[in-house]
């Protein structure tokens, strides 16, 4: 079992999400994070209640697919989301506009 750096990032994000962020974003995201052959998924609910993050797959309006190392860079601000998308380091399935609201998460992770 691979320990991904993303796990620590999601734990930290879970402490920071709140009802205000939910009001601002209003989207359920799924993150599919890969590390070599390993893949893990997290659900980030920024639509209901005061928000929550759970490990595992589920229904989402927007699915973000990226490598563990690029996810960490995205969340610490060293990788620009638009550049990552254009450079193929980040793939989006579903609602492309919802991905624009990800800055609420990246800003809170910094």
Image (spheres, rainbow, N blue to C red):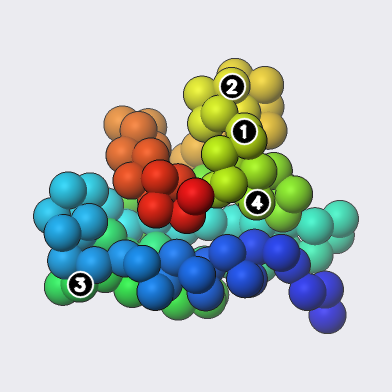
Circle on res. 83: 2
The first of marks 1 and 4 along the sequence is 4
Dots 1 and 2: beta carbons under 8 Å? yes
Residue 29 % position (x, y): 39, 55
> Residue at the location (31% across, 39% down)?
101
Residue 31 % position (x, y): 53, 56
In what element is the residue under mark 2? helix
Q: In screen coordinates, is 66 left or right of 93?
A: right
The CA span between labels 4 and 3 is: 24 Å
The first of marks 4 and 2 along the sequence is 4
Q: Quadrant of residue 23?
A: bottom left
Compared with 54, 81 (above or below) is above
How many numbered callouts?
Answer: 4
According to the picture, the residue beneath numbered tag 3 turns out to be 50
Q: In screen coordinates, is 29 left or right of 47?
A: right
According to the picture, the residue beneath numbered tag 1 turns out to be 79
The first of marks 3 and 1 along the sequence is 3
In what element is the residue under mark 4? helix
> Residue at the location (58% across, 47% down)?
76
Check the picture and name the quadrant holding the N terminus: bottom right
The CA span between labels 3 and 1 is: 27 Å
Which numbered disc, 1 or 2, marks the residue closer to the eye?
A: 1
- Pick whichever, 13 or 101, lies toward us: 13
The first of marks 4 and 3 along the sequence is 3
In what element is the residue under mark 3? loop
The CA span between labels 1 and 4 is: 9 Å
Asked whether the viewer can see residue 95, the reply is no
According to the picture, the residue beneath numbered tag 4 turns out to be 72
In what element is the residue under mark 1? loop
């Amino acid at each position: 079992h691979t320990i991904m750096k993303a796990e620590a990032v999601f734990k930290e994000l879970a402490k920071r999400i709140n009802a205000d962020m939910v009001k601002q974003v209003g989207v359920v995201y799924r993150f599919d994070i890969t590390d070599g052959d390993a893949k893990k998924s997290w659900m980030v609910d920024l639509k209901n209640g005061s928000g929550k993050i759970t490990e595992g797959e589920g229904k989402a309006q927007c699915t973000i697919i990226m490598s563990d190392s690029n996810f960490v860079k995205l969340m610490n601000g060293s990788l620009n989301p638009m550049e990552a998308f254009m450079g193929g380091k980040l793939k989006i399935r579903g609602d492309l506009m919802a991905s624009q609201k990800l800055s609420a998460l990246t800003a809170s992770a910094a």
